[in-house]
Image: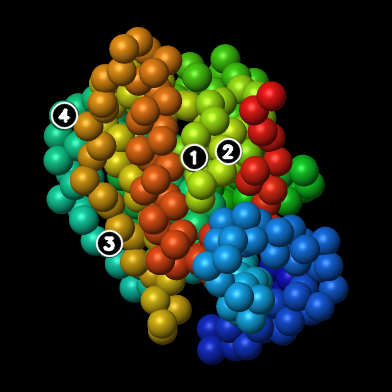
Amino acid sequence: MCSLIVKIMPAGFLYGFAKLVSTMAYHFAGKQKKIAFDSLKIAFGQEKDRKELDRIVRECFDYIAKSAVELMFLMYNPHLLKKRVDISGRENLEKALSRKKGVILVSAHFGNFPLLLGRLAVEEYKIAGIMRPMRDQRVEKIFLEKRNKYGVKTIYSQPRDACVNNTIHSLRNNELVFIPIDQNFGTAGVFVNFFGKKAATATGPVIFAQRTGAALIPCFILRQKDDQHRIIFEPALDLEEGRNSEETVLINIQKLTDIIESYIRKYPAEWGWIHRRWKSQPN
């Protein structure tokens, strides 16, 4: 229903509609709001007072609603992506692609990250994203069809063997593979420091880089004041070698996590605080 409304809505009404959705969610999604406050307290501790935390949560809900309506609108108007999404640091991406070993775009559930994938696809970059399927299979089917239409390849995180094989295949074809590593990864990952507390984190980007020689490029998409967007490609991360493969993975996942944290600290409302990032803890 919401998708149909956005499809027929004039572009000038998009953000007014998003504000309405955000206001309703903020007042009725008590569970998600509590998770957001709890997460912010873990991250910022005594750095920010209750008023500041409340402002971040409110903006976070606003940004989530804006991102949702933008995504639905631009799914029907992909020709507008180039106008709405700018790219910074493209030279870092091109330099990495010139090595012909693929590029791992390491990122987070930060900003309107699906637009990052769509923007690169309309530029005719070969791009895939590792994703968890949505719980609602009907909605997942809609978004899968739209990703396919854009030219964004979907690599589902499960089953694991298929995920690994498809990712390696894409990298060996010198494609871009987008991997967010900012959500709780249970006991299957490594524990690194994130805002001063241990967080279970996926190891995939570093392991794939070790196996294929692919470049690791941190990348993010930032909302601008006028609700345009800017993609930033950081310089490729040089892998730091540890005493063994496991230590190498730990060292470099920590470095990537530090970069993600630095962006969240600068733009806290851009991150999805309604996720229990620190749910899993070391025994």
Rendered location of residue 274, percent (x, y) = 68, 58
Residue type at mark 3: give it: Ile
- Distance in Å between CA atoms under marks 1 and 4: 31 Å
Residue type at mark 1: give it: Asn
Residue 49 visible from this viewpoint: yes
Q: Are marks 4 and 2 in contact (CB under 8 Å)?
A: no
Q: Nearer the viewer, residue 243 or 234?
A: 243
**Quadrant in the picture for residue 38:** bottom right
The disc at residue 199 is 2
**Residue on which disc 3 sits:** 87
**Residue on which disc 4 sits:** 99
Query: Who's the residue at 63% across and 39% down the image?
Result: 184
Q: Nearer the viewer, residue 144 or 234?
A: 234
Q: Secondary structure at mark 4?
A: loop
Rendered location of residue 54, percent (x, y) = 66, 76
Q: Quadrant of the C terminus?
A: top right
